[in-house]
């Protein structure tokens, strides 16, 4: 889960679409498959499948 600072509800409309697009691009670059994702107003839920050489701590950076 990724949460906005102070849980401000800023992930709406064009901002939510842009965040979704950036997440997809970043995952493609790192060879990570997004299994399921949901963007709420103040947080993002993601279920991903990552290659074994990619540490979870590096994935969320």
Image: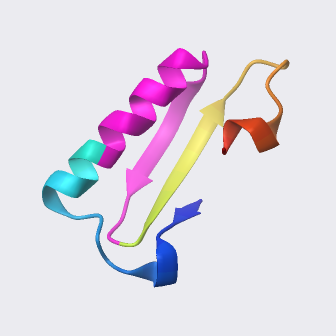
Picture coordinates of residue 40, whole percent (x, y): 36, 65
Residue 51: which quarter of the image? top right
Does the stretch in magenta take in 42? no
Residue 22: which quarter of the image? top left
Picture coordinates of residue 33, whole percent (x, y): 56, 23
Name the quadrant of the C terminus. Answer: top right
Bounds of the magenta segment? 19-41
Q: Taking 42 as reference, is 16 above or below it?
A: above
Name the quadrant of the N terminus. Answer: bottom right
Q: Taking 40 as reference, is 7 above or below it?
A: below
Left or right of residue 35: residue 20? left
Residue 15: which quarter of the image? bottom left
Does the stretch in magenta take in 38? yes
Left or right of residue 30: residue 41? left
Looking at this view, name the residue that lies furthest to the left: 13
Q: Taking 35 as reference, is 12 above or below it?
A: below
Picture coordinates of residue 55, whole percent (x, y): 83, 32
Picture coordinates of residue 6, whole percent (x, y): 49, 84
Q: Residue at x 15, y 59 (%)?
A: 13
Left or right of residue 30: residue 10? left
Q: Residue at x 70, y 25 (%)?
A: 50
Q: Taking 44 as reference, is 30 above or below it?
A: above
Count up the numbered dots.
0
Left or right of residue 28: residue 61? right
Q: Residue at x 60, y 23 (%)?
A: 32
């Amino acid at each position: 889960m990724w949460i906005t600072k102070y849980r401000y509800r800023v992930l709406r409309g064009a901002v939510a679409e842009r965040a979704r697009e950036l997440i997809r691009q970043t995952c493609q670059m790192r060879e990570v498959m997004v299994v399921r994702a949901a963007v709420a107003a103040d947080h993002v839920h993601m279920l991903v499948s990552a290659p074994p050489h990619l540490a979870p701590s590096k994935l969320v950076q």
